[in-house]
Image (cartoon, rainbow, N blue to C red):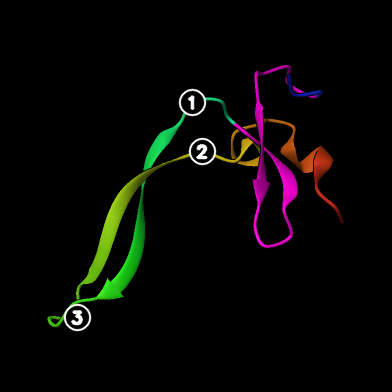
Amino acid sequence: ACKSCKAEIRWIKLRPMMKNHPVDPVSVKVIVLGDIISDGAPVGKIVDGYTSHFATCPQADDWRNR
C-alpha cells in the first residue's frame, strides 16, 4: 500500500536503470508507436501497461526529489 494515501500499488522495474517504480495495480491498454509507414502515419501496437502511482496519488509531491 502507498505510505501516503494507503491505496493499493504494485512495483515494477523501469528500464534502463531497472529502478523500482510504484504503479496502480490495474493494467491499462496503451499504444506503443513503432515504425513510420509510407504515408507518414506511425504504426502502433496495443499492449498492457500501468499508470504511474505518482500520476494518481494525491500526495505525490511529497515523494518527489527537489
Answer above or below: position of 36 versus 21: below
Q: CA distance from mark 2 to mark 3?
A: 28 Å
* Image x and y of residue 26, in percent: 49, 25
Q: CA distance from mark 3 to mark 1?
A: 33 Å
**The magenta segment:** 4-23
Residue 15 colored in magenta in the image: yes
Q: Which quarter of the figure is the C terminus placed in? A: bottom right
Answer above or below: position of 66 versus 63: below
Give the residue at x 70% y 42%.
Answer: 21
Q: Amino acid at mark 3?
A: Gly
Give the residue at x 65% y 51%.
Answer: 14
* Residue linked to disc 3: 40
Where is residue 59, by image quadrant? top right
Task: Judge the density around disc 3: few (<14), some (14-19), many (≥20) Cα neighbours within 10 Å.
Answer: few
* Residue linked to disc 2: 50
* Image x and y of residue 39, in percent: 12, 81
* Image x and y of residue 4, in percent: 79, 24
Whether tag 1 and tag 2 are in contact, CB under 8 A, the answer is yes
Give the residue at x 67% y 62%.
Answer: 16
